[in-house]
Amino acid sequence: MNIVDIHEFRKIQPKPTTAPQIKFKEAEYASLPNGLQLIVVENNKLPRVNLQLFIDHGLTKQWTKAGVVEITGQMLSTGTSSMNKSSWDEQVDFYGASVATTPIGGYASSLKKHFSSVIGLFADAILNPSFPQSEFDNIVRQYQSNIAAQKEEADAIASNVSKKVTFFHDHPYSEVVTESSLKNILLEDCINYHKVNFVPNCSYLIFEGNITLDEAVIMANTHFGSWKSSSFVKQIFDNSFPQIQQDVNFVNKKGAVQSLIAITYAVNFQPYNSDMVAANLLNSILGGYFSSRLNLNLREQKGFTYGINSKLQNDENIGSFFTSVNVRNEVTGQAIKEIIGEIRKLTEVNISEEELLQVKNVISGNFSRSIEDPKTIAKFALAIKKFGLPDDYFTTHLQKIASVSIEDIYNMARKYLQPDNLHIIVVGNEEEVIDQLAEIAKPNPVKIYDFEGNQINS
């Protein structure tokens, strides 16, 4: 082939090939008599073992005591019935381990030769926390300090307002931890939350690394076999959401030289439903990667921002759409209009074959790289078990991506994008942006909020 032929050859776009079925290490499953589910993804490349405990206890409404759930998660690693926090921390450090507790369980990781000891430390924290009053007081003070600092943080303020305007007030997702809610929390509240919600018969223990199923079962029995099951029942909440027309919500941040714009709404988008692959591709086109429409518009064409992205979040309870961006005060209104315009365009005009192919390539590449991490395979195994997915759900993921059509993207846009039903939230300098927002809000007034997300005008 001569030089001319080579140049002509390079102009020809390669024809797509059939997406392959991916093969990766299959997970193994077991369970303990107390109902604790075990998932093991063996990976012998490194002499390490990673452990995750996921307690699927559902949502908890905290009412006037928002913060109980979060504080309880931290309290579990502040001492056990057999050792205080200092001794527990020293043991974790001695083994060179990483151990943490959360409101839904926690994780532990170490070299395999130390793992039998490390899992014991982790189990001790989960099953036998001592809940010392002094540590509780310290954690509450830390939260109080963080909240005081967040009064000036635009991201935290926008998050608070977003929760309040997007979800019904009696739904857990609407709750905001505040200075007043912290004052209502007692140590006894954390003890009761742990007692009710930390039970094995709604929990998964996920091992990943240099460990076999037989070894995992022995360790789980040794350290979690005494964990008593209970007649745990998930709380049921109204997972519908307010039907809205577009509203504009504002928090004044005096002296701010830029505005934080957040646009959000609730949507019924269940994990691993039949729409999931196409809907995720839709979001990628809108704002899910560097060459997305939002980023090309606001960053590359307009020069309004360093970057913007969007997220279409699936959730067992209530899903949501969210995008946010920081822009100069003087272009706040114009930036909002551009974002809404890009959302609307996807609901009205089909994308091109070239744009769809580009985003498929990006998402397929990201997925292929992600499965190089065995922790990703463990996450897949949990999803298969928890949601009852087919065994080949993830091995055929590239094929699912390849099968998405232009019509599928259009249908997803019509179903999940709501250009006329947006909560627009702005945190910025009132003197410079309020008139721009009033123009967008017409004929309705701009709603004014404080930093906690409480509306302060009628």
Image (cartoon, grey):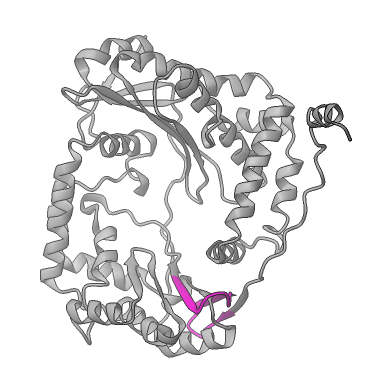
> Residue, x 48% and y 77% (percent of image)?
48
Residue located at (67% from left, 39% from top): 360
User: In the image, is residue 281 above or below residue 353?
Assistant: below
Q: Is residue 223 visible?
A: yes
Q: Is residue 405 left or right of residue 362?
A: right
Asked if residue 272 is positioned above or below residue 408 in the image, the reply reads below
Q: Quadrant of residue 358 in the image?
A: top right
Identify whether 408 is placed above or below 140: above
Is 155 displayed left or right of 114 in the figure? left
Would residue 339 be seen by someone viewing this image from the given angle?
no
Q: Is residue 361 above or below residue 345?
A: below
Depth check: give the residue in front, 317 or 153: 153
Whether residue 39 is in magenta: the answer is yes
Q: Quadrant of residue 336?
A: top left
Residue 405 image point, x, y percent:
74, 34
Q: Position of residue 12 (x, y in %)?
A: 81, 30
Work out which quarter of the rendered image holds the C terminus and state it.
top left
Residue nearest the observer in this picture, 372 or 129:
372
Q: Residue at x 47, y 84 (%)?
A: 220
Q: Quadrant of residue 391?
A: bottom right
Question: Is 412 included in the stretch rendered in magenta?
Answer: no
Specify the segment rendered in magenta: 30-52
Viewer-proximal residue among 352 and 262: 352
Rendering coords of residue 409 (x, y %): 67, 32
Residue appearing at x 31%, y 19% in the figure: 328
The image shows a total of numbered marks equal to 0
Rendered-image quadrant of the N terminus: top right
Image position, residue 41 (x, y; %): 58, 73
Judged from this view, the residue extending furthest toward the right is 1
